[in-house]
Amino acid sequence: MRTETPPLIRLEDYRPSAFLIDRVDLDIRLDPHATRITAELALRPNPKGDAEAPLHLDGDDLTLIAIDLDGAGVTPGDVTIDPSGLTLRNPPRRPFILRLVTQVDSTANTKLMGLYRTDGVYCTQCEADGFRRITYFLDRPDVMSVYTTRIEANREEAPVLLGNGNLVESGPVGEDRHYAVWHDPHPKPAYLFAIVGGRLGKVETTFRTMEGRDVACAVYVEPGREDRAGYALDAVIRSMAWDERAFGRAYDLDVFNVVAVSAFNMGAMENKGLNIFNDKYVLAVPDTATDADYANIEAIIAHEYFHNWSGNRITCRDWFQLCLKEGLTVFRDQEFSSDMRSRPVHRIGEVRSLRARQFPEDAGPLKHPVRPNAYAEINNFYTATVYDKGAEIVRMLRTLIGGAAFRAGMDRYFADNDGTAATVEDFLAAFATVTGRDLSAFARWYERPGTPTLSASGRYDPAARTYILRLAQILPVEGPPLVIPVALGLVGAKGPMTDVTCAAVTDGVFVLDRDEAELVFENVAEEPVPSLLRDFSAPVRLDLALTDEQRLRLLARDSDPFNRWQAAQDVAMRLILDPDPARAGAFAEALGTFLDAEALADPAFAALVLALPTEGEAADSLPSDVDPDAIHQARRDLRARLGRALRPRLERIDAALLSGQEAYSPDAASAGRRALRNAALDLIAAGDPQAGAALATQRLDAATNMTDRLAALATIAQIPGEAREAALTAFGERYAQEPLVLDKWFAIQATIAESETLDRIARLKVHPAFSMTNPNRVRALVGSFSMANPTQFARADGAGFALVADVVKALDSTNPQVAARLLTAFGSWRRLEKNRRVAAAEMLNRIKAVPGLSRDVADILGRTLKDG
């Protein structure tokens, strides 16, 4: 393990590689403990590189068996091997062939990086720098090579052998072994390399591209689970068709394979032609998967497929450009899901995720620009800032230049950069070329850490029939202003004011590209309520002083679904932070009117309106001295009040939705009806816990799908008593052989907001289904506790912090990536009240005292403690 203090890598220090590798021929002979890899690398000096540099090949935890150059041995004194890799001091200054033979123990590879073995299946994970754990290599994204890979294995152990590209040859080797040769004609960086070997079942079909080529598409899963792979395969086909329609991008190989494995550090990986997935994002049947699972499978299948162009055909010049592939591809998968489902509902979901994950990141010690300017450990920069804020920047660009110009710019980007390792500048240059616009000021979004605030205030002049709106941007760091597209409108007593005019607004958008601006709206017949940042047109915080009455007008009358939802959120947030029974009563009345008019017309949207801001969002809105217990109690009290006030309506809605219930389908409309029924159940239980527990128990017993069953269990879990324990026990027994379902069971128990939860977690850690070696189990239990149970994680006595710190220390030596991600839960510790700050600091320093910390954990820890 690399435990030394890593050097800080800076964007400004980027230099092209001194050598290039045009061709890679691999012979991989799989063995549980002694896999042997023979790599033949066709190298040549890079004309753009340092002509005098030695050849340094990255390597990590490898055993070198043999090395030769152009078929001859290498002088021992000319080769140096250290923990960072292999250095050839005097390489030829001409094209040459370097042959390397290495050996790895895939079974002992608990880091799940490089080549590892899980549940008898060999698989790889090479992003960001895992290929160096397979063979010595120039393991950087700007070194792109054509790969041919021969895989050999015991036929009984691994009847399925998969690699990148197209299958070109296969056959027996002696009596008990066989081989397969895969060739990928498209040059790619090492991080996109992949193989899989094992005993797997599959479902398959054929997709015909817009160019008339037939592509064999398959999803490989654990044998006996093929019936759970159908939805993922359908999502593959829909993704292929959508990318052709929306972006004109056709698939470019003869086969496209998806493989589901049980132990995976990430969600999935876009390896060329061979996507490897965490099985939670592939396997689904109604009895084990929720509506959210189906939506996630659809989105993540699409995301990894869309990488074929935005990430594979065009990759990153260096890891500082990670947002170029991830932010862009998140935007693409969001658009896909919006077309597959309800666009307004999906947009609200995107923003909720951004605010829950990225806004706190931007406000804490782990903040960084969307394109970082330095890093110590790249694995720690697969963040919400890179992914989610990166996607918002792409969305803003489309808003600024319009849909047609955006599509033209994407076409130009693909045409100009196909087959290259590109930069953010290359991406923006394509849009500047097709529009003739200077995008240098817009590029600042990639450079600035932190979340800007849009400050707004308005004044109505009834005599002049004008409304003056003043906007200003408040930046978290000093510098020139950002370019902020503000989608806006005015709302009167009866709805949107369509007759007003403003010269500064084009197609409903004002571009704030200076520190402040004043907009004058003409022909304004009555005092309006401004509706700003419609559809969340920029990733900023909005400072706009409106009364509850004005916000509830937006809920009732605005034409923008996002701002209608936002209005309800804003009123609820104020009531959590500043409880007031009279205002809470008015809010309940407004919600009742909304439900009467619209709940059954759009159940999915109604469910979102009923969902109050989370405790984490409330904490994120406070600058300091956060008391999680006070927030929890205030939110609980508000939910109870709303539940009691709305109960008759909620019961009527529940009955109406139940009467139209059909056989389970994961489609958006059906999911929306279930979402509203379950939101109603949860609010009823908040208002009357005993009645709610009885109703939830009935719902649990009658449920015909996992969505309803899990929602009922989650409601019961927050109500102490025998019914809860009986329900949890029965659920655990029923799904004892379903690891992914037990993950949900672990998570529900980990988020019970009671002091006894720590004891419950201690018991669950020794449950037969729990394993510290499986990232899904750890994330379900310990990750859910740290991220979604603020009162217990941030207990004043420090016991919650200690629980997570102990798991981080235990995992650091075996899977440092998972350990580091758990540690990010401490990101907001400095904003807690004093006693909790002291307790958190003690735990962080306890981790710091552990000798030989991994680079992953040491990096997160150092940045977390450095702030302030």
Image (tube, rainbow, N blue to C red):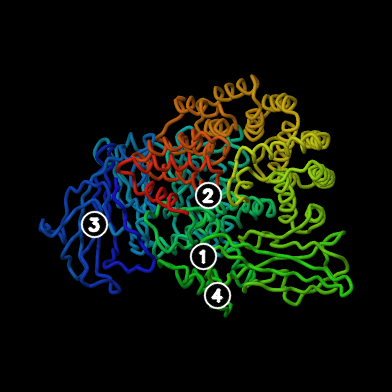
* Residue that badge 4 annotates: 439
* Residue that badge 3 annotates: 40
**Residue 590 point in image, percent of width and height:** 82, 46
Q: Earlier in the sequence, mark 2 or mark 1?
A: 2
The amino acid marked with disc number 3 is Glu
The amino acid marked with disc number 4 is Leu
* Residue that badge 2 annotates: 301
Mark 1 vs mark 3, foreground winner is: 1
Question: Label 4 crowding class (10 Å Cα cut-off): few <14, some 14-19, many 20+?
Answer: some
* Residue that badge 1 annotates: 448
Mark 4 vs mark 1, foreground winner is: 1
Is residue 156 left or right of 564 when viewed as pictured? left
Label 2 and label 4: CA atoms lie apart by 32 Å
Label 2 and label 1: CA atoms lie apart by 31 Å
Q: Please, is residue 277 above or below residue 451 in the view?
A: above
The amino acid marked with disc number 1 is Arg
